[in-house]
C-alpha cells in the first residue's frame, strides 16, 4: 500500500514544480517534517545557513541574479525575527522570496508554549503577502499562491506559515503554479509626459533609473536619449543589480552625502523616474533638505518598478527621435596599480585593475568603496549588487546567494569589517557549499561611516565614550582566524602590492578565499 503524501511533501513538490529549486534553511523542531520532505524530493537544493539573516540575504542575492525566488525555511517567530534585517534589504531591492515559517501545531498554540508568538504580525512588517495554512489539504495550494505572489513584478515577499500538524497530516499532493505574467507595458500617456518633460528641460532634465532600467539594454536607450537631447541620467543611490563594465553604458549613482548629491542634481528642472523613486537623503540632518533634488523640479514617472523599463525607454527614445543615436559605451580601461600605502584610491585601483571578466560584485563597502564605480567603468563586463535597504550585514549573504545562482561565475564580495560581523556565519556556508567567492574585508577597525555621521548630525563635543562606540579596536578583529574558524582559507595584507598579489591569486583559484585588507 502506498503511503499518503503529507502536507510538507505536497508543499516541497509544489515549490519544485513552480521552479523554486533552492531553499536557504535554518530549521527547528516544528519544521522537521518539511526537512524530511526536502530529503525525499529531487530537484531542491538545500543550503544550510547558521543564522536566519543569512537565509534572507542569500535569497536576495539569488533573486537578483535569476529573477526567480528561492525559499527560506525559518523556525517560528524568533527565527523569522532574526531574518528581518535582510528581509528589509530584500524588499528594498524589489526582490522576491517564498518564506516558509514553521509554527506550533494548530492544537498546541492554545497552551502558549515558550516559542509561541504572533508570527503573522512579525511577518506583516516585511511581507507583501502572509498566510497561515490551517489544514494539510490546503498547504500545497497555499504554496502555489505564495510562489505566484513572489513572482509578481518586480518581485515580492510571500510568507507562508506552516503549523506542524499541517506538515505531518495527509496532504492533497502538489498544486499547479500559475505561469507568471510578463511586466506590464507603460501607458502611452506616460511616454508622452516623459518626452514633454525632457523637451522642456533639455540639459536640465534628469532621468533616475532603477530596478530593470539599470540593465545593459535599457541603459543604452537612456544613453541615446541623453546624446540626442542633452538630458542626464543616473542610477538610484542603492541598486539591486547594475550591468556595467567595458562595452556597456557608464552610469553614476545619486551620491550618498547630501551636499554631493545636491551638487549633482543642481539645476534639475524635470525629474523622470524609470523604475525608481525620487532621491531622498538617507537620514535627516540639521539645516539640510530631505529631498536630493530641487523641490521645484517637475517629477514625472515613466515606469513604475514593476513595469517594463526597457520597452518604456525604447519607446521614449523613438518618440524623441533618438533611436538611431549611438549610445556612449565604456571603452576597455584598467586603472594603474598603486604602490605602498593602502589608501581608498589604491584599493579601488586594485579592484578595477584585476576584476575578472563576468564577475558578480557584492558591495557592502560603506565608506571604503566610494571610488569603486569610477575605477571599474572600463573593467570587463560584470554585475554590481549593492546594499539596498541600509540595514548592514547583507554583503556576505548576498555573495552566498549570487554564487549559488551562478556557479560558473566568480563572485567578489567587497565587505566592510563592522557590517561583516553581522553575518559572519555566511563564511561557513561558503565553505560548506564550496562557493567560488573572493571576500575582501576592509579592516579599518571602526564603524568609519558613523564617525562622519557624528559630525553630520551636529552632535556636540563627542568624547571618549562616543568615539569608543564607533571603534572596533581593543581588541582588533582577526579576520584571518575568524575565516579559518569557518573553514575558509584567508590571508592578511597591509600594502597595495600585497593586496594586488592576493586578489589576483584568489581570483585564479576556485572556492572561497578571504583577504583581510588592513587600512
Image (cartoon, grey):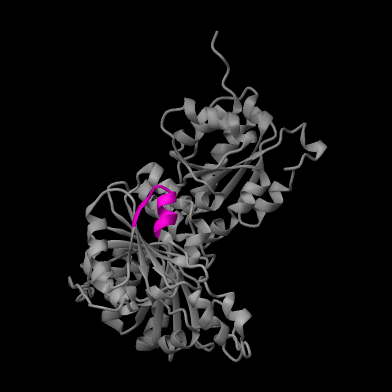
Q: Is residue 80 left or right of residue 500?
A: right
Residue 298 vs residue 509, the one in the foreground: 509
Q: In which quarter of the image is residue 374?
A: bottom left
**Residue located at (25% from left, 68% from top):** 498
Is-magenta flag for residue 483? yes
What percent of the width, then of the height, locates residue 441? 39, 64
Q: Is residue 334 left or right of residue 491?
A: left
Position of the N terminus, as image quadrant, is: top right
Range of residues picked out in magenta: 480-490
Q: Is residue 471 left or right of residue 243?
A: right
Residue 208 vs residue 8, the one in the foreground: 8
Please say whether residue 381 is visible from this viewpoint.
no
- The answer to whether 490 is drawn above or below residue 291 in the figure is above
Which residue is at the far top?
1
Q: Quadrant of residue 346?
A: bottom left
Please say whether residue 28 is visible from this viewpoint.
yes
What percent of the width, then of the height, locates residue 143? 56, 38
Which residue is at the far right?
111
**Residue located at (40% from left, 81% from top):** 206
Residue 302 vs residue 511, the one in the foreground: 511
- The answer to whether 410 is drawn above or below residue 309 in the figure is above
**Residue located at (54% from left, 32% from top):** 35
Position of the C terminus, as image quadrant, is: bottom left
What percent of the width, then of the height, locates residue 12? 51, 32
What percent of the width, then of the height, locates residue 462? 61, 86
- The answer to whether 502 is drawn above or below residue 458 in the figure is above
Is-magenta flag for residue 393? no
- The answer to whether 28 is drawn above or below residue 226 in the figure is above
Which residue is at the far left?
332
Amino acid at each position: 500500500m502506498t503511503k499518503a503524501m503529507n502536507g510538507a511533501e505536497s508543499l516541497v513538490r509544489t515549490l519544485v514544480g513552480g521552479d523554486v529549486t533552492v531553499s536557504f534553511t535554518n530549521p527547528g523542531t516544528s519544521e522537521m517534517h518539511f526537512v524530511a520532505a526536502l530529503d525525499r524530493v529531487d530537484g531542491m537544493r538545500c543550503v544550510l545557513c547558521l543564522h536566519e539573516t543569512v537565509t534572507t540575504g542569500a535569497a536576495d542575492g539569488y533573486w537578483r541574479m535569476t529573477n526567480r525566488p528561492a525559499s527560506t525555511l525559518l523556525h517560528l517567530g524568533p527565527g523569522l525575527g532574526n531574518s528581518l534585517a535582510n528581509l528589509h534589504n530584500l524588499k528594498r531591492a524589489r526582490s522576491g522570496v517564498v518564506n516558509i515559517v514553521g509554527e506550533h501545531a494548530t492544537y498546541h498554540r492554545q497552551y502558549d508554549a515558550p516559542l509561541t508568538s504572533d508570527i503573522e504580525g512579525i511577518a506583516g512588517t516585511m511581507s507583501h503577502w502572509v498566510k497561515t495554512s490551517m489544514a494539510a489539504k490546503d498547504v500545497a495550494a497555499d504554496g502555489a499562491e505564495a510562489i505566484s505572489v513572489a513572482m509578481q513584478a518586480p518581485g515580492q515577499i510571500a510568507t507562508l506559515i506552516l503549523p506542524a500538524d499541517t506538515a505531518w497530516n495527509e496532504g492533497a499532493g502538489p498544486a499547479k503554479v500559475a505561469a507568471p505574467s510578463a511586466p506590464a507595458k507603460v501607458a502611452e500617456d506616460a511616454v508622452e509626459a516623459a518626452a514633454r518633460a525632457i523637451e522642456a528641460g533639455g540639459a536640465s532634465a534628469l532621468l533616475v533609473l532603477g530596478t530593470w532600467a539599470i540593465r545593459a539594454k535599457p541603459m543604452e536607450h537612456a544613453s541615446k536619449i541623453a546624446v540626442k537631447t542633452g538630458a542626464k541620467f543616473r542610477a538610484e543611490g542603492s541598486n539591486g543589480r547594475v550591468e556595467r563594465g567595458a562595452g556597456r553604458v557608464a552610469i553614476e549613482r545619486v551620491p550618498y552625502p547630501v551636499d554631493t548629491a545636491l551638487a549633482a542634481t543642481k539645476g534639475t528642472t524635470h525629474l523622470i523616474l524609470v523604475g525608481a523613486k525620487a532621491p531622498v537623503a538617507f537620514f535627516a540632518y540639521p539645516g539640510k533638505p530631505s529631498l536630493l533634488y530641487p523641490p521645484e523640479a517637475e517629477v514625472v514617472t515613466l515606469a513604475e518598478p514593476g513595469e517594463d523599463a526597457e520597452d518604456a525607454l525604447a519607446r521614449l527614445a523613438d518618440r524623441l527621435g533618438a533611436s538611431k543615436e549611438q549610445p556612449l559605451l565604456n571603452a576597455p580601461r584598467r586603472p594603474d596599480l598603486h604602490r605602498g600605502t593602502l589608501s581608498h584610491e589604491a584599493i579601488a585601483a586594485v579592484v578595477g585593475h584585476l576584476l575578472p571578466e563576468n564577475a558578480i560584485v557584492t558591495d557592502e563597502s560603506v565608506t571604503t568603496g566610494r571610488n569603486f564605480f569610477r575605477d571599474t567603468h572600463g573593467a570587463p563586463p560584470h554585475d554590481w549588487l549593492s546594499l539596498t535597504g541600509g540595514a548592514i550585514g547583507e554583503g556576505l549573504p548576498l555573495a552566498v546567494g549570487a554564487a549559488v545562482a551562478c556557479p560558473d561565475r566568480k563572485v567578489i564580495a567587497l565587505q566592510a569589517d563592522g557590517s561583516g560581523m553581522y553575518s559572519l556565519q555566511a563564511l561557513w556556508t561558503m565553505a560548506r557549499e564550496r562557493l567560488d567567492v573572493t571576500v575582501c574585508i576592509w579592516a579599518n577597525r571602526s564603524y568609519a561611516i558613523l564617525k562622519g555621521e557624528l559630525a553630520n548630525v551636529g552632535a556636540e563635543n563627542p568624547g571618549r565614550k562616543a568615539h569608543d562606540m564607533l571603534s572596533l579596536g581593543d581588541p582588533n578583529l582577526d579576520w584571518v582566524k575568524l575565516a579559518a574558524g569557518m573553514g575558509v582559507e584567508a590571508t592578511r595584507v597591509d600594502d597595495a602590492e600585497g593586496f594586488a598579489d592576493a586578489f589576483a591569486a584568489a581570483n585564479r583559484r576556485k572556492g572561497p578565499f578571504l583577504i583581510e585588507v588592513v587600512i
